[in-house]
Amino acid sequence: MQPRRITIVGVGLLGGSMGLALRSRAKDCKIVGYGHRRETLDAALQMHALHEGYEQPGPAVRGSDLVVLCTPVGLLRPMLEQIAPLLDRGALVTDVGSTKRSVVEAAEAILPAHARFVGSHPMAGSERRGIGAARADLYDHALCIVTRTERTDLAALEQIESFWRLLGMRTCRTTPEEHDRRLADISHLPHAVAAALVAIQEDPSLALTGKGFLDLTRIAGGDSVLWRDIFLDNRDNVRKSIRHLSEQLKTLSDLLEPGKAEALQAWLEQSARRRQKLLDEKKQST
Amino acid sequence: MQPRRITIVGVGLLGGSMGLALRSRAKDCKIVGYGHRRETLDAALQMHALHEGYEQPGPAVRGSDLVVLCTPVGLLRPMLEQIAPLLDRGALVTDVGSTKRSVVEAAEAILPAHARFVGSHPMAGSERRGIGAARADLYDHALCIVTRTERTDLAALEQIESFWRLLGMRTCRTTPEEHDRRLADISHLPHAVAAALVAIQEDPSLALTGKGFLDLTRIAGGDSVLWRDIFLDNRDNVRKSIRHLSEQLKTLSDLLEPGKAEALQAWLEQSARRRQKLLDEKKQST
């Protein structure tokens, strides 16, 4: 899908990078930004991430065939309410939120019948944020999960997939439920663990850490408001993931006996081998 | 300390890198290797990590004023027994093991009174191993923890510290007990967690992961025999660290309520800020 006019709602890292990528990949597309802060819009205009930037939703949303919500998870519902009365007939709407059940449910309830919504989660990002961190290649080669429900319009789904592929992404489909369950395991839990690993340290222990510990806890440096909202929105799954991890660590703890050395080694070996397999697969796919 | 003749016991990543670093930093020092496999010794000789390489301990250890044990934690005790009768009067002995209580206790029990032992843990390494991964700058700028007990000879302690500084390292002192307790928190627990994070994943979830997940679990790719022995040797502390982390994750789990959003954000913020402070300190010190 080559949008004719796109509205990017929220011009931060993800929205700004989207504008930059579209400039070279969809030369005929008018890129319009909507945001609360004039300063941010001006910065985006100056770096050519946008053609037009508005502080009001009306002029930003009206006339667009694609609207992409790039605001944090906690602001998606009020934003849907704001844009709902402004959408053109047939307009496509998607988002970039890290959780999918609540936004898909809200969109299907709030948006008018003449617009079509498909949830998206482009798995690209950085622990940096804001328009200053935007870059044209942020989405390159990364995976975008798009969601499908009983109410999803198949033509809209395919158009949204082709939009992400236009940005250089690979795409795959899940239900919002499956998305949130798997993301709790592969993204939200790791974030929780990284933060907990920092939290339990005594200061003199931190002084002994090296680059490895900083690398390992890098995601704990993420924006706390953003993550608070992700955790709250997906709390049932995150709780389950925490429970699974704690059980797995208990299993390991029970293996820490000289008489169980073989089983301990097998447990370690299994994870090392699984990770190596994953690494090999990722190398092949890029 | 500039050793006159050094014996490197075990010529893998750490031993080989030590030889390479000494070649340029201690030009008058004779670098002798002791290992079981002729092939490895030949590879080390060929890359100029050693001047001489022996498959027998006698010719390797006799005549050296410094012996550094670079074998895995699980082999340190039998190696101490093997070299004990061969040590010159006044010879210094140290090691590079990732745990310190057991090796220091074994060394103080096994080595003859005319030799002097100081435990070391140079915190340098890689998930790669073997002489093929050795490099002259492995130790540069990293931290080496040296251990002090009631029986430690202070002159020997200072000589060992100056040896590590010769290799480009910073040094600090702890007791073996403090070392093992802190390392459980900052190194052994993170390894356990990385492996557990891989272990709990379903295959379709792993397919959704990106570079972030691979980075985060990088240490889970380490050698399973090596880590088995570290975990077993330090099992009392590792169990405590696992318990602390599980408690911390339980705290987080309890904060996942919309009514506790503020406390949740504060919890996340605290870890993000602590990590940032650590990052700033590390940047300043390098």
Image (cartoon, coloured by chain):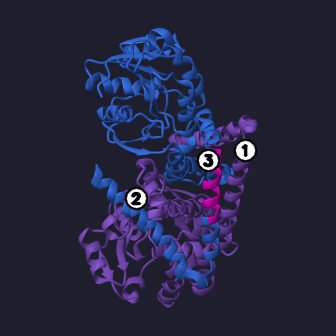
Chain colours: A blue, B purple
**B193 relative to A217, above or below:** below
Question: At which x and y percent is residue A34?
Answer: 47, 16
Residue B209 position in % (x across, y down): 43, 50
Residue A151: x %, y % from top left: 48, 36
Q: Can residue B104 be seen in this view?
A: no
In the image, residue B11 sits, relative to residue A249, either above or below, namely below
Residue at the disc numbered 2:
B138
Q: Does the magenta stretch include residue A236?
A: yes
Q: Given the image, on which type of amino acid does mark 3 rest?
A: Ala
According to the image, label 1 marks what residue?
B255
Whether A246 is among the magenta residues is yes
Residue B22 is left or right of residue B252, and the answer is: left
Q: Which residue lies furthest to the left in this view?
A: B46
- Of all chains, the one bearing label 2 is B
Which quadrant does the N terminus of chain A fall into? top left
Q: Nearer the viewer, residue A161 or A113?
A: A113
| Residue A131 picture location, percent across and down | 45, 24
Which of A170/A227 is in front?
A: A170
Q: What stretch is highlighted in magenta?
A: A235-247
Residue A239 visible (yes or no): yes
